[in-house]
Image (spheres, rainbow, N blue to C red):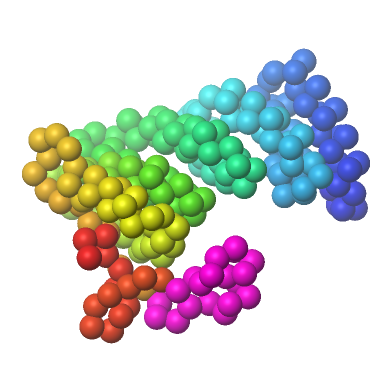
């Protein structure tokens, strides 16, 4: 890994994976991740490292004790693994990792009383929505944003900002046809069932687009964000 030899790293990761099939202890899995996680960033070793890391996050039990907790480290790993699956084109596994991200945090959420766990859940749904929209998974991202918008608490525990969603959501929606955008935004804005409120994402966005070279790298004609308002700097799902 330190020498930058991707092919040799791939071989070592495969051997490490074979070893972990025999030693299923959490301590062995933790040590293996010191190699396997960085290997996800090496093209030659990525496909060998991904099943290993996936097995680790699937098998390690989220825990909280007097000695500490593995919740945050496990959740961080799940975000990394999800991103890798999306980059390799496996959206189903990418979404599964983010669902597990929520399950891991739920272990900590349930320690609190009242409706504070709902406030924490709302924050965590924001993280998941961010990851989904970052990956271009607009439908799943809108679904999580909708779930997040439907959470209401009886006390003011603080704010959960919408900052950061608009740019990714706008670019994702721009890749869809007019009919697809209308259908998805209609479903998001007017939730089915007994809900008596509307959902909306509104945010000020930059008026200047990145240089064209970045759009070329992303395979798009332009990275300019669709916006409205007097200054042309407001994005809203309701407009």
Q: Residue 17: x, y in percent? A: 78, 26
Q: Does residue 112 sit above or below 133 in this rendering?
A: above
- Residue 155 visible? The answer is no
Q: Position of residue 122 (x, y in %)?
A: 30, 45
Residue 211 on the magenta segment: yes
Q: Give the magenta range.
A: 206-224
Confirm whether residue 197 shows in the render: yes
Q: Residue at x 68, y 20 (%)?
A: 25
Q: Position of residue 77 (x, y in %)?
A: 58, 41
Horizontally, is 153 left or right of 125 in the view?
Answer: left
Q: Which is nearer the eye, 104 or 213?
A: 213
Residue found farthest to the top = 22
Q: Residue at x 30, y 48 (%)?
A: 184
89 lies above or below 15? below
Residue 210 within the magenta-colored segment of the rendering: yes
Return the residue nearer the eye: 82 or 12.
82
Please name the predominant secondary structure of the magenta segment in the image: loop
* Total residue callouts: 0
What residue do we see at 15% from left, 51% from top? 198
| Rendered location of residue 191, percent (x, y) | 19, 42
Q: Nearer the viewer, residue 230 or 219?
A: 219
Q: Is residue 181 above or below residue 92?
A: below
Looking at the image, which is closer to me, 55 or 197? 197
Q: Quadrant of the C terminus?
A: bottom left
Q: Residue at x 34, y 35 (%)?
A: 109
* Relative vertical location of residue 238 with respect to residue 15 in this rendering, above or below: below
The picture quadrant where one finds residue 196 is: top left
Q: Is 2 displayed left or right of 231 in the figure?
A: right
Q: Quadrant of residue 67?
A: top right
Side of 180 relative to 95 (left or right):
left
């Amino acid at each position: 890994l330190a020498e930058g030899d991707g092919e040799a790293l791939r071989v070592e990761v495969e051997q490490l994976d074979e070893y972990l099939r025999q030693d299923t202890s959490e301590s062995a899995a933790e040590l293996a991740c010191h190699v396997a996680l960085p290997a996800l960033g090496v093209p030659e070793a990525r496909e060998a490292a991904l099943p290993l890391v996936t097995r680790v996050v699937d098998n390690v039990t989220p825990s909280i004790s007097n000695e500490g907790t593995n919740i945050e480290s496990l959740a961080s790993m799940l975000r990394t693994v999800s991103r890798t699956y999306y980059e390799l084109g496996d959206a189903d596994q990418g979404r599964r990792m983010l669902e597990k991200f929520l399950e891991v945090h739920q272990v900590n959420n349930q320690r609190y009383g009242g409706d504070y766990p709902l406030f924490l859940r709302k924050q965590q749904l924001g993280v998941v929505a961010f990851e989904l929209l970052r990956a271009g998974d607009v439908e799943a991202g809108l679904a999580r944003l909708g779930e997040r918008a439907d959470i209401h608490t009886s006390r003011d525990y603080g704010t959960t900002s919408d900052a950061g969603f608009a740019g990714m959501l706008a670019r994702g929606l721009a890749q869809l046809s007019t009919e697809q955008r209308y259908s998805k935004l209609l479903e998001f804005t007017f939730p089915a069932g007994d809900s008596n409120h509307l959902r909306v994402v509104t945010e000020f966005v930059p008026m200047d687009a990145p240089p064209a070279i970045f759009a070329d790298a992303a395979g798009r004609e332009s990275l300019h964000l669709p916006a409205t308002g007097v200054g042309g700097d407001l994005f809203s799902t309701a407009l």
